[in-house]
Amino acid sequence: MRFFLMVALAGCLAASADAKVAPSVGGSASARSGQWVSFQAHGFPANTRLAVMLSPAQSAPGNCCGIGVKTHWKTNVSGTATLRFRWPNHYEACSGGNNCTATKWAANSTAIVTVSTTSYTHFTAATTTTLVRN
């Protein structure tokens, strides 16, 4: 029995040593259209490109609405990056593949900020929320 417990404990310790830090993102608690905002991404793979997607929380879960910000950020060797951009004036609300309209952010609405890798082979993402004060 002791041998079994020692083997199980060794397996757990080895698994925890190999475990990676889950990606996370944090930053600006609120934003206005046109305002510079900053978010910090942690726990992503080293030297990986990141993309930012913004979407209104009232549309979650779903894929009808949102806007891509940029895709040129790159994490450093420790898997972190500072993402700085101007908050867009609108997002795209779509009711079909090509049927999209620019929609202004509602005052005091919540936006979901999703940061993800651009790699299809090693995809990972993290989200946070921001209050839009237009």
Image: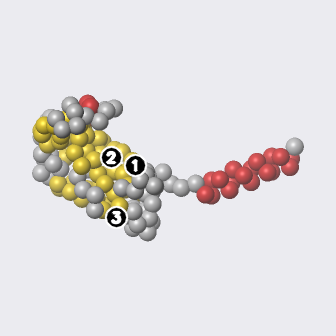
Q: Of residues 100 and 33, which is closer to you in this image?
A: 100
Q: Amino acid at mark 2?
A: Thr
Q: Secondary structure at mark 3?
A: strand
Which residue has dot 1 on it? 125
Numbered mark located on residue 74 in the image = 3
Q: Amino acid at mark 3?
A: Lys
Kindly identify the residue that appears in the image at 29 percent across and 36 percent down.
63
Where is residue 105 shown, x and y percent of the image?
Answer: 15, 38
- Can you see residue 103? no
Q: Secondary structure at mark 2?
A: strand
Q: Secondary structure at mark 1?
A: strand
Where is residue 119 shown, x and y percent of the image?
Answer: 40, 56
Q: Name which of mark 1 and mark 2 comes first in the sequence.
A: 2
Task: Farthest residue to the front: give it.
Answer: 98
Which residue has dot 2 on it? 114
Q: Name which of mark 3 and mark 1 comes first in the sequence.
A: 3
**In the rendered view, does 68 fall on the left or right side of 81?**
left
Q: Of residues 30 and 18, which is closer to you in this image?
A: 18
Kindly identify the residue that appears in the image at 74 percent across and 50 percent down.
9
**In the rendered view, does 127 fall on the left or right side of 69?**
right
Where is residue 132 shown, x and y percent of the image?
Answer: 19, 41
Q: Quadrant of residue 83?
A: bottom left
Q: Amino acid at mark 1?
A: Ala
**In the rendered view, does 67 fall on the left or right side of 114?**
left
Kindly identify the residue that appears in the image at 43 percent across and 57 percent down.
44
Q: Quadrant of residue 112?
A: top left
Kindly identify the residue that appears in the image at 44 percent across and 64 percent down.
46
Reply above or below: 58 against 122.
above
Task: Farthest residue to the bottom: give it.
Answer: 77
Q: CA distance from mark 1 to mark 2?
A: 7 Å
